[in-house]
Image (tube, rainbow, N blue to C red):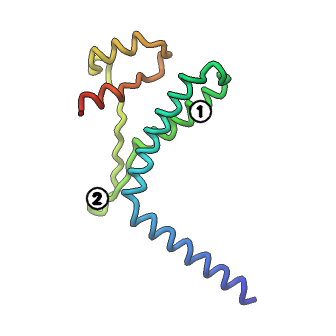
Amino acid sequence: MVLPLVVGLLGAVGVGVAVVALVQNWEEIKNWLHDFSIKLKRVWKEICQKFGEYIPHEVKVFIDRVVEGVVHIAHRVYYQENDEWVQHTTIRKVPESEVPPDILAKHSNSKQKKNRGTDITDILRMELS
C-alpha cells in the first residue's frame, strides 16, 4: 500500500525536476532546435541530390513534409513579456510586388511547383556575412 504512494511521489518529483530544467534551459533548447532544423533541411537536400534516383517519390514527399514541419515549428517563438504572452512569427504572406526581383527570377527559373517555396538561405547568408 505504501509502494504505489512512493512511486507516485517519485514520479511527481521527477516531472517537477524535468519542468524546472526545461524552463531554465529554454533559450538553449530553442537555439538548438533552430540550428537542428537548418541542418536537417541541408542534410535532406544533400541526400536528395546524391541519392535522389534511389529514393521512391512517396518517401521524398513524406520526408519533405516532415522537414518542412520541423522548420516551420522553429519559425514560431513564444515568450512572456510584462505578464503577456507574445507569439513571434518569422513567416508572413506578402504580395508579389514586395518580393525582390532576383528572388522572383530564381523562383521562376527553378523546377519547383507553384505552391512550393524557393530556398534563398545561401543568398541571405552571403549578404549578411
Is 2 situated left or right of 94 in this image?
right
Height in image: 88 above or below 12? Answer: above
Amino acid of disc 1: Ile
Is 127 situated left or right of 5 in this image?
left
Q: Which residue is farthest front? A: 50
Counting residues from the start of the chain, the first of labels 2 and 1 encountered is 1
For mark 2, what is the residue? 81
Q: Which of 4 and 109 is in front in this view?
A: 109
Q: Quadrant of residue 108?
A: top left
Q: In which quarter of the image is residue 76?
A: top left
For mark 1, what is the residue? 63
Q: Which quadrant of the rendered structure holds the C terminus?
A: top left
Residue neighbourhood size for the residue with mark 1, other residues' Cα within 10 Å, grouped as few (<14), some (14–19), many (≥20): few
Amino acid of disc 2: Glu
Residue drawn at the location 24% of the way across and 33% of the way down: 128
Residue drawn at the location 33% of the way across and 15% of the way down: 104
Is 26 situated left or right of 10 in this image?
left
Residue drawn at the location 65% of the way across and 28% of the way down: 59
Q: In which quarter of the image is residue 125?
A: top left
Which of the two marks, 2 or 1, is nearer to us in this view?
1
Residue 21 appears at what percent x and percent y?
A: 45, 68
CA–CA distance in space, label 2 to label 1? 36 Å
Residue 62 appears at what percent x and percent y?
A: 62, 31
Height in image: 90 above or below 119? Answer: below
Residue 77 appears at what percent x and percent y?
A: 38, 48
Look at the numbered disc 1 and give the secondary structure of its residue.
helix
Count of numbered circles in the view: 2
The reply to whether callout 2 and callout 1 are in contact (CB within 8 Å) is no
